[in-house]
Structure formats: C-alpha cells, structure tokens
C-alpha cells in the first residue's frame, strides 16, 4: 500500500491511497463470500454459484461496492498512521480507480489539527467568586426539595399549569390524519413547553375523561415540510389529571425525611450546601472565563470539518441522553418543530468554543511541558475502580494501551487548567450603581 499526502488550504489534507490489485481481488472474493448465500441462479443451489459465473452474468462490478468498503475499512487506519498527520475529522472518501486487475485507488480528505499561536496565558484576570447565600436562596432550594418529595395525586377537578395529563391524541389537517401525529397514554406536563406552542395551554382547565380538540398552527420552519405553517387539530382524550401534594416543612417532616432533627438544622445544612455549590460553580466559571480570554488572545484557524465532527459528537451525546428519557431525536425534532440543520447551527457556536478551548489547553500543556505520568494514570484507574466498585487489577486488564494514552492526554489537559488557575488574578466584580444604571438607560 502506498500513501501520498497533499496539504490543502485551511488545515485540510488529502491522502491518496493506492492498494495493490491483488488485495482488490481478495476483497472481491470476500464480498462474493458475503453475498453468495443470497444469490440464486437456475441450476445451482443457493450458496453454490461460482464467483466467475456470477461475474459473467451480472458483470465484474457486481461485487465492487462491497469490496471497496472492505478495502477502505482495512487500509484507512494504516494510511492514517503512514500519513504522519494529526487528523481531527472523519475522512471524506472518494474512489478514483476501481477495476479488477488494477490497483485500487481512493482519496480521503481530512482535517488536520491546526497550530495554535498562544497569547497571554499566565496571570489572566478573572472575576472573584461570590459564594454568599441569601435567605431567599435557601428558601427556594428547600421549596424545590419539597416539590421533589411531593406525592402525586389524581385530580378530579380541572387541570392547571404544572399538572401532568395522561392523554391520547391524534392530529389531522383538513380532517385527514398525518403521519407521526398520534400517541396513546402520553404523560404531558402542562407548561413544560415540550409540545407545539399553544398545545398545552388548551388542555389547562379540563378534567379527566374529557375530550378536547386542540387547534394549533405548525411553525413556518417546522422540520416536516409537509406540515410547516399548516393549521392542525389534535383530538385529545384526557385519561388522568395528576397533580402534586407538597409536604409541609416542619420538625416532623425534617426528622422523617432527612438526617436532621429540626428545621433550623436542616436550613443550616442547605445553606452550607449552597455555599459549597456556589464555590464550585464559581471555580468552573473562573476556569471558563480564563480559558475564553486565552482563546481570544490566541490565534488558530479551525478547519470546518473539525468543527463538523465536534457538532456530530455533541448531537450524538444529546440523542443518547434523549433516548435515556424514552424519546428519539426524531420525536424531539417533531415536538419542538426544529429541523436537524437548524439544530446543527444552534450547537455550532458551542462546538467551536469547545474545539478552541481544547486546542488552547493542549498548547499550554505543550508550552509548559506538562505531561501525565504512569502514576497519574494509575491514580485515575483507582478512581475508576472505586466508582464502578471493581478491583483495580480488573480495570487495568480492561484498559488497553490506546485508552491509557487517551487518559494521559486528558490528565495533561486537567493539569494545564490547574496551571492556568494557579496563576490567575482575581478582580472584584464591579457593582452596578444607580448612576451606572441611569447611564446605561440613557445609552439605550
């Protein structure tokens, strides 16, 4: 196999991979063996038709597509290594020669990790943490905890915002039901904003057992073009209306539901927890602020393919989270009226920020010669063992060399963040005075 590298503009490169004709022949045979049990020709039993006979009847190219896929899957990892490039995207593949008896040639266009020209990264100014907790914040936190402990009750009266209704629904346009507009025994929290605008509001004020026609208009930018901008009617039947019965905060509740005995003790613990949370959130905010300033003061040129790859990763993570809640990404798009293209554009700025932050932190680690040792990896493996309740030796058996190298990179990034934060300069957040507010209002 031969690999040629051509550097393109904007940190892109093209690999031209040439594979010997003999390897193509082997791949064609593999493709034949993969398909032979489904090939039927008169005079032969299934799975017994000779490869030459199939190629004679259907043409030599009958197995080309599968053979090409086999060869690219087998050879691209090695081509990646031979190229010596730090590739940061999925390859965009194009086959340039595929003919029996000749070398197989394909190209792979890829994004290459860009060089980063670091700006100032020592002594970055960040906003000082304010971890003060007010009585109002304590009360709001306790209210939220009480709501979590609320008992679900079936309401016999009218539904209200915050209640959950269990409904059957079927949507139609001009009396004709449309695909994807039907559901049964669906739990919908009124006021959650999870359905098309105007849908949930029309179910407020109704009782269990009632039938309600909900009239809505799909947004103009709705992901299903055949529904976009059209008026629809959803015939809904309400099976149940479920509300919450929130417990009363007193010493009895505290003693029964927490590790404390009195309301005062409970409030003091909530205040301490909120203070610790504010400190942790403040630290993360300082890290984000410092890294953002370093990114702003640095120079790099991100290839679009690298950003697209990060967008794909973020959408996959989101889809997995939605699946854990019993909702597919397609259903989410339908309920929110968003298209996949619009969703990609929505997450793209965050994808750019994440990519730039990662590159800058790698550059800081390189500049300061920050590396992860084997001892660092062992410590991380011990943390994993505790987290999963496994023996450390068992974890080590499951983690291969490539995973350990990836862990070392992650640990080096963590150390780079720690280095930056050890060298920050805190500045007090400017208080908004009455004069500032008036000047801001005048400016508007």
Image (cartoon, rainbow, N blue to C red):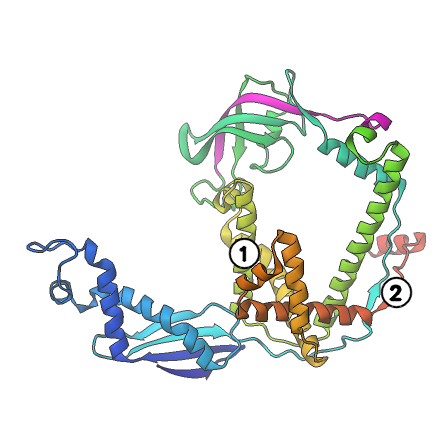
Residue furthest out toward the left: 43
The mark total stands at 2
Please indicate whether residue 276 sits to the left or right of residue 300 in the image: right
Q: Is residue 410 above or below residue 272?
A: below
Res 55 → quadrant: bottom left
Q: Which residue is mark 1?
A: 344
**Residue 345 point in image, percent of width and height:** 56, 57
Could you tell which of marks 2 and 1 lies nearer the N-terminus? 1
Please indicate whether residue 25 sits to the left or right of residue 146 in the image: left
Queried whether the magenta region covers residue 128, the answer comes back as no
Q: Evaluate whether residue 357 shows in this view.
A: no
**Residue 226 point in image, percent of width and height:** 42, 42
In the picture, the quarter occupied by the N terminus is bottom left
Please tell me the numbered disc located at residue 309: none
Please tell me the numbered disc located at residue 427: 2
In the picture, the quarter occupied by the C terminus is bottom right
Which type of secondary structure does the marked residue at label 2 adopt? strand
Magenta region's main secondary structure?
strand
Q: Evaluate whether residue 402 shows in this view.
A: yes
Residue at 44% in and 30% down: 172
Which type of secondary structure does the marked residue at label 1 adopt? helix
Residue at 89% in and 59% down: 430
Label 1 CA crowd tier, 10 Å (few <14, some 14–19, many 20+): some
Res 20 → quadrant: bottom left
Q: Is residue 410 above or below residue 339?
A: below
CA gap between label 2 and label 1 equals 36 Å
Queried whether the magenta region covers residue 246, the answer comes back as yes
**Residue 223 point in image, percent of width and height:** 48, 46
**Residue 5 point in image, percent of width and height:** 44, 83
Q: Nearer the viewer, residue 394 or 423?
A: 394
Please give the range of residues in magenta: 230-253
């Amino acid at each position: 196999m031969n690999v040629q590298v051509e550097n393109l503009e904007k940190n892109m490169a093209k690999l031209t991979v040439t594979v010997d004709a003999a390897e193509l022949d082997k791949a064609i045979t593999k493709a034949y063996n993969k398909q032979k049990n489904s090939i039927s020709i008169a005079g032969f039993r299934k799975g017994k038709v000779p490869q030459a006979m199939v190629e004679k009847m259907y043409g030599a190219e009958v197995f080309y597509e599968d053979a090409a896929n086999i060869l690219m899957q087998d050879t691209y990892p090695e081509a990646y290594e031979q190229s010596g490039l730090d590739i940061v995207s999925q390859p965009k593949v194009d086959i340039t020669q595929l003919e029996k008896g000749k070398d197989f040639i394909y190209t792979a266009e890829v994004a290459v990790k860009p060089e980063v020209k670091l700006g100032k990264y020592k002594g970055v100014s960040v906003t000082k943490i304010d971890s003060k907790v007010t009585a109002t914040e304590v009360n709001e936190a306790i209210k939220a905890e009480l709501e979590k402990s609320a008992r679900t009750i079936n309401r016999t009266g009218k539904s209200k915002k915050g209640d959950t209704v269990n409904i059957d629904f079927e949507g139609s346009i001009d009396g004709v039901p449309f695909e994807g507009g039907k559901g049964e025994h669906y739990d919908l929290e009124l006021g959650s904003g999870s359905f098309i605008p105007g849908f949930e509001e029309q179910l407020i004020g109704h009782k269990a057992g009632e039938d309600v026609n909900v009239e809505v208009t799909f947004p103009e930018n709705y992901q299903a073009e055949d529904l976009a901008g059209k008026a629809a009617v959803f015939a809904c039947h309400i099976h149940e209306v479920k509300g919450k019965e929130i417990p009363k905060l007193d010493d009895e509740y505290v003693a029964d539901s927490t590790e404390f005995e009195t309301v005062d003790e409970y409030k003091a613990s909530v205040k301490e927890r909120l203070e610790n949370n504010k400190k942790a959130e403040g630290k993360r905010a300082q890290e984000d602020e410092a890294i953002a300033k370093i990114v702003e003061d640095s120079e790099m040129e991100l290839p679009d393919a690298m950003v697209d790859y990060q967008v794909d990763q973020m959408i996959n993570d989101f889809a997995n989270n939605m699946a854990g809640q019993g909702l597919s990404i397609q259903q989410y798009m339908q309920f929110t009226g968003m298209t996949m293209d619009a969703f990609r554009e929505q997450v793209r700025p965050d994808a750019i920020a994440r990519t730039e932050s990662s590159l800058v932190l790698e550059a800081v680690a390189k500049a300061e010669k920050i590396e992860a040792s084997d001892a660092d990896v062992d410590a991380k493996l011990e943390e994993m063992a505790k987290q999963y309740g496994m023996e450390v030796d068992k974890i080590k058996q499951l983690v291969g060399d490539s995973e350990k190298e990836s862990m070392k990179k992650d640990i080096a990034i963590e150390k780079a963040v720690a280095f930056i934060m050890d060298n920050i300069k805190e500045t007090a957040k400017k208080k908004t005075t009455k004069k500032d507010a008036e000047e801001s209002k005048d400016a508007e």
